[in-house]
Image: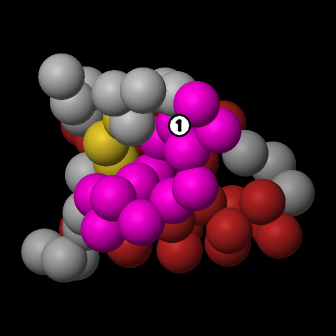
Amino acid sequence: MTACVDTEAVRHQLVQAYTRAVLPDVVAHLRVALDEFDNDGVDELVECPVCGRLGMAERIQAHDCPR
């Protein structure tokens, strides 16, 4: 069974961090991360059903599972 990461929840957390950030470098970094979420090409992370590792689907299919 493959578990998908709730990208909307992750985006929500990034927005919360962005609205509370004080340091200019942190604000800029969070802005870039949020811009990535706004792109239509954002891939959801999936979990390896054997070891639980998270990653993009094509990388999980090709990773060296330790089990």
Q: Viewer-proximal residue, 25 or 4?
A: 4
Q: Is residue 17 visible?
A: no
Q: Which quadrant is home to the C terminus? A: top right
**Residue identified by numbered label 1:** 53
Position above or below: 28 against 7: below
Q: Residue at x 33, y 59 (%)?
A: 61
Q: Position of residue 35 (x, y in %)?
A: 38, 72
Position above or below: 58 against 11: below
Q: Position of residue 64 (x, y in %)?
A: 58, 55
What secondary structure is marked by label 1? loop
The residue segment tinted magenta is 53-67
Q: Residue at x 53, y 74 (%)?
A: 32
Left or right: 23 in relation to 56: right
Membership of 66 in magenta stretch: yes
Q: Picture quarter containing residue 6?
A: top left
Q: Position of residue 24 (x, y in %)?
A: 81, 67
Give the colour scheme of this rendering. Answer: secondary structure
Q: Residue at x 21, y 30 (%)?
A: 2
Membership of 26 in magenta stretch: no
Q: Residue at x 34, y 48 (%)?
A: 45
At label 1, the amino acid type is Arg
Q: Picture quarter containing residue 46?
A: top left
Position above or below: 50 against 32: above
Mark 1, other Cα within 10 Å: few <14 / some 14–19 / many ≥20: some
